Amino acid sequence: MDPKPLFDEEEPLKPEPLFGDTGSATVTPLPLEFPDAPAAAPQPPTQPQTSQAPQVAALDLSGTPDPAPARSFAPDLALDLGPDTPTPAPVTASPMTATASAAIPIDEHPSIAQAMVRGTEKFPDVMRDYGYLVRNNLNRIVPLDFRTLTDFGSDTLSRAADLIGQVVKVSQSLHDLGAEDLIKDILEKAGNAGKHKSMLNLLVSHTFDPQAAMLQLTDIAQAIRQSLTQVDTIDDLLSRVRMTLTVETATIGIVDDMADRGTMGDMLARKASAMTTSLQEVDMAIRQAANIRRQAEEWVMRCDEVRTLTLPAMGFRSSLG
C-alpha cells in the first residue's frame, strides 16, 4: 500500500493570512480614511470580529481638520456677563482728582466732597501728594465736636515739641564739648612750645604734652561722632513728623475755612494756628539739625587733621610715638 502524499497536487497552495481566523475566507482590508474624502463603508467580515477597531474606523470625520478634534478651552476662560450686563467703561481721571478721591468710604459725610474741593484750592501741593490722607482725617473729625477737635493732632504736636527739644539738647551738648576752643588751645600751646625749643632750648615742654593733646583730640572727635548719630536719628524722625503735621494742618485748615464763626469756630482757629506754628518750628528744627551736622563734621575733620598732620609737622612726631 502506497503512503498518502503530504500535499495534494491538484489543489494549489494557499498563503496563510497573518491576522484573523486562518480558516476563514480572505478578509477585505478596511479602507484608509482621510479628512477630505468620505469614509468608505467597511465590508462585513465573514467571521465575527472580536476587535472593536472596525467600529472606531467607521466614524464619520468628513469635514473635520483632525481625526481627533482637540478640545477648545477658550469658552472656559471667558467670563459671560450675559446679554443684559453692560461692559464697564474705563475710568479716566486727572492725577489730582484720582489722588484726592481715592478710597471714598460708602458712609462718607456729605460735606467731605465740598471740603476736598476747598482743600484743592487752598492747599494744592498737599492735596496732590497726600489728598487721600486728608480725606481720611476729614472722615475722622466730621461732624466736629469739642472732644474730637481737642484730640485731633495732639499726639503729633507733642511729638514735634519733643523732637525740637532734642535738637536743642544736642546743639547744647556739642557746644559744651568746646571742640573749637580745644583745637585752638592745642595749636597755640604746641606753637609756643616749638618756638621756645628752637630759640632758647629751654625746659618749657611741661607747658604742652603732645600725647595728652592726642588723647584729647581723639576723645572729643569720638564724642562729636556720637552726637552726629543722634542728629541723624532726630532728623529722620522730624521728617516723618513734618509729613504727618503737614497733613493734619491742612485738614484743620480746611475745616476752619468752612466753619461758621462762633464758639467752635474760634476753637478751630486757635487749633489751626497752633498746628501752623508747630509746623514752622519743625521746619526750623530740621534746618538747625542740618547746620549742626555740618559744624560737627567740620570739627571731626579738624581734630583728625591736627592729630595726624599738624602736630607731626610742628616737630612732635617723635613725642607722639
Image (tube, rainbow, N blue to C red):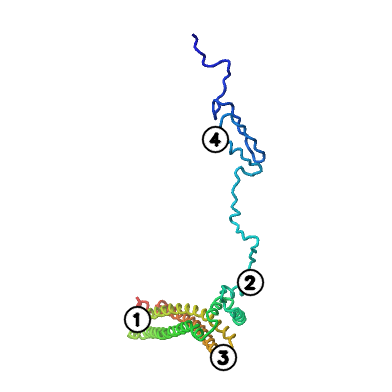
> Would you call the spot at circle 2 few (<14 residues within 10 Å), some (14-19), or many (20 or more)?
few
Q: CA distance from mark 2 to mark 4?
A: 70 Å
Q: Earlier in the sequence, mark 3 or mark 2?
A: 2
Mark 1 and mark 2: span between their CA atoms? 70 Å
Q: CA distance from mark 1 to mark 4?
A: 109 Å
Q: At which x and y percent is residue 63? A: 66, 43
Check contact, mark 2 vs mark 4: CB within 8 A.
no
* Label total for image: 4
Q: Nearer the viewer, mark 1 or mark 3?
A: 3
Residue with the mark numbered 4: 51
Res 21 quadrant in image: top right
Q: Amino acid at mark 2?
A: Ala
Q: Is the residue marked by circle 4 packed among few (<14), some (14-19), or many (20+) residues within 10 Å?
A: few
Residue toward you, 124 or 313: 124
Q: Residue at x 60, y 78 (%)?
A: 113
Q: Going from the N terminus, do you reach mark 1 or mark 3 first?
A: 1
Q: Left of 37 or right of it: where is 162? A: left
Question: From what the image shows, is residue 209 above or below residue 66?
Answer: below
Which label was assigned to residue 93? Answer: 2
Q: Quadrant of residue 118?
A: bottom right
3 vs 2, front mark: 3
Please tell me whether mark 1 or mark 4 is closer to you in this view.
4
Q: Are marks 3 and 4 in contact (CB under 8 Å)?
A: no
